[in-house]
Image (tube, rainbow, N blue to C red):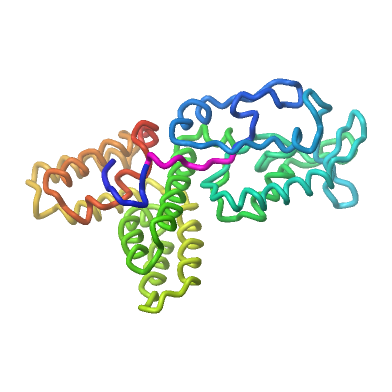
Amino acid sequence: MFPSYSWQSFDRPIRLGVSQCLLGDLVRYDGGHARSRFVSDELAPWVEFVSVCPEVEIGMGTPRPAIRIVETDSELQLIAPSTGENFTSAMLRFSRSTIAKLQTEQLDGFVLKKSSPTCGTGRLKVYREDVAVRKDGVGFFAAELMRLWPNLPIEDEGRLNDGPIRENFIGRIFARSCWHGLIESGLNRGSLVEFHTAHKLLLLSHSEPGYRRLGRIVASLGTDEDSTVFEEYELVFSETLRTKPTPKAHVNVMQHALGHLKSLLSSVEKQEILRSIEDFKKGHLPLLVPLNLITFCVRVHQVDYLMGQIYFAPHPKELMLRNHA
C-alpha cells in the first residue's frame, strides 16, 4: 500500500450487498445458483457480504415458477406466466423495507444478478402478454435500490467481466469505505482537507470538473463547520467517481505527477517514463507499467505530496485491476 491514513485500511472489510445466488447458494428459480468466481473468490478476502434474494425472501420458495416483467396499461407488473400469480406489491413492499434497513448498515456497494426480473440492472425483456415488446427493463428490487440509494455504487456481475468497468466499481467501493472510515475517525474541517488532498489525483483521473467542484466545496468550509458542506462533499465525491477514467485522463494525471518529479530525475529516467506513458496511451501497455515507474521514483525521492496520493493505491494490488491494456 502506498499512502497510509487512519481512514484508509484494506484490513477494514468492505460492506458489500450481493445477490445471494452469486455466492453459490441454491436460491435460483430452478433450484440452482449463479456463483460468480470474481465475487466469491477474488473479492471475498476484502469483503463482508450482505446477501439478499428478493424472490426467496417474499416467500416464493426454491424451486419456483419463473417470473417476468409484464407491461399492462403502461404499468409494470411482476408476474409468473405459468400460474398468473402477481408478485408486484409484495416485491415492492419487500424492496422498500429491506433497502431502508440496509441504509442503516453503511454498505459500500452492491453487486446484483444480471438478467434477473428482480435484480437485473437493465436490458431486461419487458413483455406484453406473451410477447417481448422491448428490452429496457430493470429488475424490481434493483430499480428501487437505484432510486432510493442513488449514491451507492451498484453493478451487475455481468458488467464486472469488463476490465475498466470492474476497476471503476471496485475503486468506488474502496473509496466509499475510506469515507466511512473518515466518519468513524472524526469528520471535521482538518480531516476533510486531508481526505480531499489525498484523493486529488484520483478525482482528477475521473473528472476534472468534479475535481474542481470538490476543491471549491472544501475551500468554502470556514472555521464554523457546517454539516451540509460535508453532505455536499460526499454527494459530489460519489458523483465524480461514477465517471469512468479514460486513458487520456490517466495520461494527464501521470504527466501532472511527473511535473513534481522533473527536477529530481535524470533525462534518461524522464524519457523512460514518458515512453511508457505514450505506450499506455496507444494501448500497448497496461496502466500498471508507467504507474510502477512513477511510484518507484516517488519512493526513491520521497516526494511527500505524491507519497500521499490514493491514486497510486486505490485498491489492493492483489486484485490486479490495473493489469489490463
Residue at (48, 61) in percent of width and height: 234
Q: Is residue 1 above or below residue 223?
A: above
The image quadrant that residue 323 belongs to is: top left
Residue at (47, 41) in percent of width and height: 14
Q: Which residues are the magenta region?
A: 10-17
Is 91 in the magenta? no
Q: Nearer the viewer, residue 88 or 279?
A: 88
The image quadrant that residue 118 belongs to is: top right
Left or right: 237 as drawn, with respect to 126: left
Residue at (50, 72) in percent of width and height: 228
Q: Is residue 225 above or below residue 303?
A: below
Location of the C terminus by quadrant is: top left
Q: Is residue 315 above or below residue 150?
A: above
Left or right: 239 as drawn, with respect to 126: left
Q: Nearer the viewer, residue 179 or 157?
A: 179
Location of the N terminus by quadrant is: top left
- Percent x, y of residue 55: 76, 35
